[in-house]
Amino acid sequence: MKFNHNMLKLARYARKMTQSALAKELGVKSAFISQIEAGLVSVPEKMLPKFVEILDFPLSFFEQETTFLEGCSKLYRAQKTLKNIDRDYIDTYASFYNRHLTKMLQSDLFDLDEFDIPEIRPDLNKSPEQIAELLREYWNIPRGVISNLTSILEDKGIFVIPISIQKEGFDATFYVNEKRDFALILINSAVPPDCYRFNLAHELGHLIMHRLPNPDCENEANAFASAFLMPRKDIFEDLTGICFWDLMPLKEKWKVSMQAIARRAKDLRKINSKQYEHIFKLINYHGYRKQEPLCGVTKEKPIMLKYVLNYYFRELGYSKEQLCEFLNINKKDYNKMYGLLLGDYIEDKSKKKTHLTIVKD
């Protein structure tokens, strides 16, 4: 077989194993694993079954002619509190989704909506708020509240993939496959529905504005998200004379957090700094800084990835096992990435805990 050393690194990242940990399992030195991953030495044939067993990937996984996030640009992600091993883990599963979608979308028998993501950089003439207004106009989004942001993103060729990762400091991240004309947003499903929507809008802001990142990316993306979800011309009157007790009904209407509404009111100069501080004192007093009332806001559910999978099952007649073979994964990773999404998984007797799962509808 032709062993792709790049896939060894991906397999190791997916299992959160260091080079030294893998070397210990194999009974070799860490330097040897480093040399294999760098492509400096070949893998002894007798070691291949051990890679399959320890890393729990099929042999075909290591034969794939692919690289880390092949054809997919990780355009920008804020430096959060995640450790490198957790960042590599998330990027690796993004790489898997990218690879799988690249293969599945090669079918000419179905089509997705056209990828339509303009690039507009902020400058002296275009603030993030103005860019948000321009994008709403370009996409023909009706004035007022966006009822389902996920649906809008999917219509433009962005796969929204909720994941559950047991680490603080991860909100969302995004990747663009410019060769295949689709994008991925991996988003933490554990956050409340209002924060979930804001995180999506935040990543959209990066995607539109930050093909070339700058030191103020995070503030710009926050400003974009706020303006995209709460346009000045539509929310301006709602914010006139607001106080703490107005935040809940406004949250129910605009589907964003009470804190985001208060900040928007301050940014639009509908309240002054003292009023803003007073509102936040009451938010803290009622315990809403960490957990706000839902106010009827529900979690949005993406459907595009499910559509692609169901097409392979229902229209092309694939079984789950055949899809695993096609995607070069085992049943554990199928369940982790797709089984829970569909509510139809392959029985797996493994008792190991998973850290990354698709959220079941």
Image (cartoon, rainbow, N blue to C red):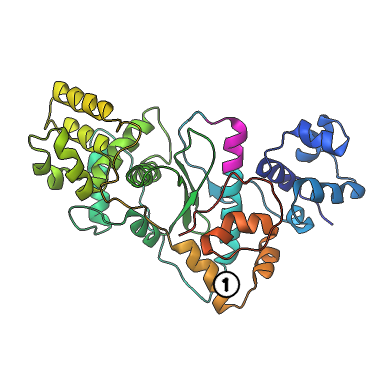
Q: Which residues are magenta?
A: 82-90
Secondary structure of the residue carrying tag 1 is helix
Q: Compare residues 96 and 238 and report the one nearer the observer.
A: 238
Is 58 left, or right, of 180 in this rendering? Answer: right
Q: Main secondary structure of the magenta part?
A: helix
Disc 1 target residue: 312
Q: What residue do we see at 18% from left, 44% from top? A: 250
Q: What residue do we see at 48% from left, 33% from top? A: 169
Q: Quadrant of the N terminus?
A: bottom right
Quarter-of-image position of residue 147: bottom left
Residue found at the very far top of the displayed protein: 274
Q: Compare residues 101 and 27 and report the one nearer the observer.
A: 27
Is 328 left, or right, of 222 in this rendering? Answer: right
What's the amino acid at mark 1?
Tyr
Any part of residue 126 in sight: no
* Residue 134 locus on image (x, y percent): 24, 49
Q: Compare residues 336 and 212 and report the one nearer the observer.
A: 336
* Residue 299 locus on image (x, y percent): 37, 52
Is 109 left, or right, of 48 in this rendering? Answer: left
